[in-house]
Amino acid sequence: MAKLQGKGDCQSCPIRHKSIFSEIPVEKLPEVIGDFRTSVITLTHNETIYTEGDPAKHTFTLRKGLIKLTKSLADGRTQIVRIIGHGELFGFDGLAGEDYNQTALALTDCEICKLPMKDLERIRANNPSVDKAMMQSWIQSLRASENMLLDLGAKKAPERLASFLLKWCKDKEPGQWIDLPMSRTEIAELLGLTVETVSRFLSDWKRKGFIQDTRSTIQLTDPEGLKQAVCSSARGL
Amino acid sequence: MAKLQGKGDCQSCPIRHKSIFSEIPVEKLPEVIGDFRTSVITLTHNETIYTEGDPAKHTFTLRKGLIKLTKSLADGRTQIVRIIGHGELFGFDGLAGEDYNQTALALTDCEICKLPMKDLERIRANNPSVDKAMMQSWIQSLRASENMLLDLGAKKAPERLASFLLKWCKDKEPGQWIDLPMSRTEIAELLGLTVETVSRFLSDWKRKGFIQDTRSTIQLTDPEGLKQAVCSSARGL
DNA sequence: CGTCACATTGAGATATGTCAAGTGGTGTGG
DNA sequence: CCACACCACTTGACATATCTCAATGTGACG
C-alpha cells in the first residue's frame, strides 16, 4: 500500500542533483523552498499514483525505482506511453490546468516525492533555474514521445523490440547484466505488440546469441549483431 | 519557394489572440517585444521549414495554413508526429538546448512567424503571460503526443482512421463539408498505415453512408454510425 | 484532349495476433 | 525441506488484419 514516509528532506535527497532543484545551492534550499510541503511516498509494484482523468493537484519526482505512465481504451487495451526513471518529473498536466492525461503506476518498488502544484508554481516563478529545469523536462518528455511515435507508427515488431533493448542498455557495456524490471506483458504494452510476439523474438535472438536474459535482467552479448539482424530483416527473415 | 514577406507586425497579426502574446494588451506590445526581430515567411505546399537535426535557432508560430511535423527512418519510412494548426507554436527544441527533433513541412500554403530563440527566451523571462502560454503549448503538445501513442499502439486500422476523422471534424456540425488538405498518403503516414488501407476503409464507409468526400474535403454524414461501426468491428466486421 | 499525380480496387503474401497447450521458476504451506 | 500451486513465460498451430504489388480509374491542369 502507498505509504507516506514523511516530509521530504530536500537537502539530503539522494537525487537532488538530477531534480529540478539541482542548480540551487544546498544552503539556499530552505529559503527557496520555504514552507513547501513535499512528502515522500513509498510504493510497491503496481500501485497507482494517479489515474487518467483525476484532477492534477500534484507533480511528482521519482526518487527511486521506475514508474510507467499508461493510457487505456474502454475495452481494456493498454498502452504504456512513457517510462519514468530516476530524478524525472511527471504528472505536470495540472500546470496547464488540465487533469492527468495518463495513469501512473509503480513498475518496481518506488519512492516518489510529491509536490503540490501551487507551491511548485510559485517556486518556479521565482527561480529561473527551477523554471529552466522544468522546461527541459517537458521538452525532453515531448521529444521522447515523438521518438516513440516514430517507433510505433513506422517500425515493425522486431525493430521496435530491438530499438527498445538497445536504448535500454545504452551507456552500459555490452556483456553486462542489466536490470529490466518489466514483464513481457509490459514490454508488449509499451511497444504495441502482444506478449507472444515479444517472447518469440527474444527467444529467437537468444538462440542466435545476440542476447541472454533471466526473468528480470538482460545482457546484450552482441548488440551489433542484433542491429544488423533487425535491419536486414526489414526485408528478409 | 519560402519567401520572406517582411518584418512581422505583431500588433495587426491576425492570430495574435491565439498566440503566446495573446494576454499582452495591444498598446503594450511594442514595449514588450522591443526590437524583437520576427519575420513572416510565406511557404507553399511541401516546402521545408526546418529539418530534423538542424540546430534549433528559431521557434515558429503558424499564422495561416497547416504544418506537418515528421520523423523518418533511414530507409525513408516516414511518420507524421504532429499536425500544427492555427496559432500553434512549434520548433521549440532549442529552448532545451537541443537540435530540432522533427522535420517541419508545409501541408498547405502557409504563413509562419519566425521568432529568434534568444529574443524569445528574454521575453518569456520577463512576461509571465508569455511564459504561461508557452508552458501550456508544451504541455498540450505532449498530451496530444500521448493520445497519439495510444492510437498507434493500441488501436487497429479502422479505429485509428475513425478517431482521426472524428477528431478532425469535431466542433463542426455533421453534414458540413470540412477541409481536409491531406493526401491519402499523408493520412497514412500520420496513422502508421498504408495508403491502400486508408483508401479501402474510406471507400467502405462511403458505401455505407457514414461519410462523403472529395479530393480535399470531407463530410461526416453519420458520425454516430461511424463510431458504432468501428467499435463493433473491434470484434466482428 | 492528354497527361500526370493521386486514388481506388483486386489478388495474393505475410507479419502479427489469437487461442491453446506446455514449461519452469518462485513462493507457500504442510 | 519438500511438494504443490500459481503465474509468467514459451512454443506451436492457426486465423486474419494489413501490407505488397499490380492494374485500373479519375480529377486537375496545361
Image (cartoon, coloured by chain):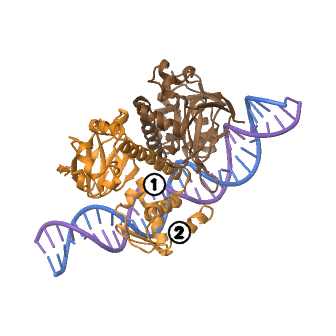
Chain colours: A orange, B brown, C purple, D blue
Q: Nearer the viewer, residue A41 or A133?
A: A133
Q: Secondary structure at mark 2?
A: helix
State whether residue A32 is above or below residue B129.
below
- SS at circle 1: helix
Q: Is residue B53 left or right of residue D30?
A: left
Residue A185: x percent and y percent?
Answer: 38, 58
For mark 2, what is the residue? Answer: A226
Check the residue under mark 2 and report the chain it is in: A
Residue at 29% over, 38% down = A117
* Quadrant of image for the N terminus of chain B: top right
Left or right of A22, for residue B111: right
Q: Which mark is residue A191?
A: 1
Relative image position of residue A54 (x, y in whole percent) = 30, 37
Q: Nearer the viewer, residue A226 or A96?
A: A96
Position of residue B229 relative to residue D3, above or below, is above
Q: Nearer the viewer, residue D8 or A153?
A: A153
Instruction: Say which quarter of the image contains residue A182.
Output: bottom left
Residue A97 place in picture, x, y as percent: 35, 32
Does the rendering let one see residue A56?
A: no
Q: Relative to A101, is A187 above or below? A: below
Q: Residues within 10 Å of mark 2 (few under 14, many from 20)?
A: many
Question: Which quadrant of the figure has residue A236?
Answer: bottom right
Amino acid tagged 2: Leu
Mark nearer the N terminus (2 vs 1): 1
Instruction: Write the residue at 34% across / 68% down.
Output: A215
- The residue lying at 53 percent from left, 60 percent from top is A159
Residue at 33 percent of width and 55 percent of height: A17
Closer to the camera, B93 or B227? Answer: B93
Asked if residue A83 can be seen in this view, the reply is: yes
The residue type indicated by label 1 comes to Leu
